[in-house]
Image (cartoon, grey):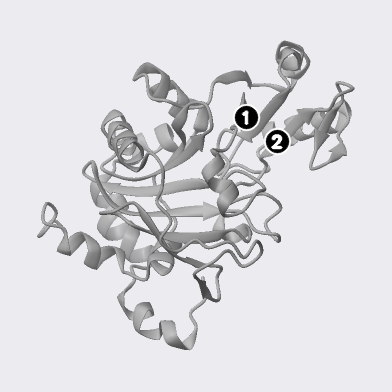
């Protein structure tokens, strides 16, 4: 994340990677529990066991030899979200949909079975994972809530909520841009939008260089917009935090048109760009919270 001249003061206040790891990740999470968040299949197990809203799992491919049989099972669906179980930052995720002729499409272009199978194999070989072999997770596609049409009409935006000891401390909305190819991840070109936690109102957006009161591509106003289901979204993040054996985590939530707030994934080491987006340091936010004062040294 870049710092412009007007961000120099903010640079002095934000929590860096080493500080986050030493004072938050390592202190509040045990390494043996990382697997429950780092692996999306493991995370879905906890979510399903606790009846926490999330995308339906259509299939899991463990080995290359399973590709054909699982692929045959998911043919009944018209839209698939394909993800590496241990991927990060949106790498390896593909959204494919059937057209009127029943052919699979990705980004407006036909994608052939051989290319889909090749992608499955690439995931299993660990190209997108945090290390070693991986699994393919195939899920129901999200149908974004109409609220997002008022900001940017392409892709699936998501909310990131960071919690410490089951208390939400900072959040943002991540929205795709023209350069992010439909993905909301900040490091892939998505726009991060700050959120006033007390009101559920959007503040300003940050694209890595500049702050905006409007989306830089659609030019639609973002500042001051009220987030639908904000209270429910926060409650869902708390419920999720309590279900996982982690005291410091990031929870990613999507807002589905039909279901409402749903968990997309859980992160042991949520990115620190959220501080730049909200123009406030993570450590000072924790220290000033009435229920967390004195928790950090």
Number of numbered labels in the structure image: 2
Q: Secondary structure at mark 2?
A: strand
Q: Quadrant of residue 33?
A: top left
Viewer-nearest residue: 221 or 17: 221
Left or right: where does residue 255 sit relative to residue 126? left
* Residue 297 seen anywhere in this rendered image of the structure: no
Q: Residue at x 11, y 56 (%)?
A: 290
**Label 1 CA crowd tier, 10 Å (few <14, some 14–19, many 20+):** many
Residue marked by disc 2: 95
User: What x and y, as percent, mark residue 45?
Assistant: 44, 21
Q: Residue at x 60, y 43 (%)?
A: 156
Q: Is residue 71 above or below residue 174?
A: above
Q: Which mark is residue 25?
A: none
**Label 2 CA crowd tier, 10 Å (few <14, some 14–19, many 20+):** many
Left or right: where does residue 193 sit relative to residue 126? left
Residue marked by disc 1: 141
Q: Earlier along the polypeptide chain: callout 1 or callout 2?
A: 2
User: What x and y, as percent, mark residue 272?
Assistant: 42, 61
Q: Residue at x 71, y 17 (%)?
A: 77
Q: Quadrant of residue 71?
A: top right
* Residue 51 seen anywhere in this rendered image of the structure: yes
């Amino acid at each position: 994340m870049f710092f412009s001249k007007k961000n120099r003061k903010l640079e002095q206040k934000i929590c860096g990677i080493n500080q986050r790891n030493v004072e938050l990740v390592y202190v509040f999470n045990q390494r043996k529990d990382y697997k429950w968040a780092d692996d999306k299949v493991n995370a879905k197990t906890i979510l399903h066991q606790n009846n926490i809203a999330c995308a339906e799992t259509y299939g899991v491919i463990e080995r290359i030899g399973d590709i054909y049989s699982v692929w045959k099972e998911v043919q009944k669906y018209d839209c698939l979200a394909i993800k590496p179980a241990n991927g990060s930052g949106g790498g390896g995720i593909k959204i494919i949909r059937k057209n009127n002729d029943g052919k699979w499409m990705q980004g407006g272009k036909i994608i052939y079975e051989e290319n889909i199978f090749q992608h499955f194999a690439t995931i299993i070989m660990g190209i997108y994972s945090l290390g070693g072999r991986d699994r393919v997770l195939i899920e129901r596609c999200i149908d974004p809530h109409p609220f997002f049409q008022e900001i940017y009409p392409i892709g699936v935006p998501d909310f990131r909520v960071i919690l410490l000891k089951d208390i939400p401390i900072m959040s943002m909305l991540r929205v795709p841009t023209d350069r992010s190819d439909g993905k909301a991840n900040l490091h892939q070109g998505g726009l991060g939008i700050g959120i006033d936690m007390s009101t559920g109102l959007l503040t300003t957006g940050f694209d890595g260089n500049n702050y905006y009161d409007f989306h830089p591509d659609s030019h639609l106003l973002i500042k001051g917009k009220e987030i639908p289901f904000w209270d429910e979204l926060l409650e869902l993040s708390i419920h999720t935090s309590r279900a996982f054996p982690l005291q410091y985590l990031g929870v990613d939530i999507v807002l589905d048109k039909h279901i409402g707030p749903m968990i997309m994934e859980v992160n042991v080491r949520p990115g620190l760009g959220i501080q730049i987006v909200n123009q406030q340091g993570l450590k000072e936010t924790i220290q000033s919270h009435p229920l967390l004062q004195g928790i950090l040294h």
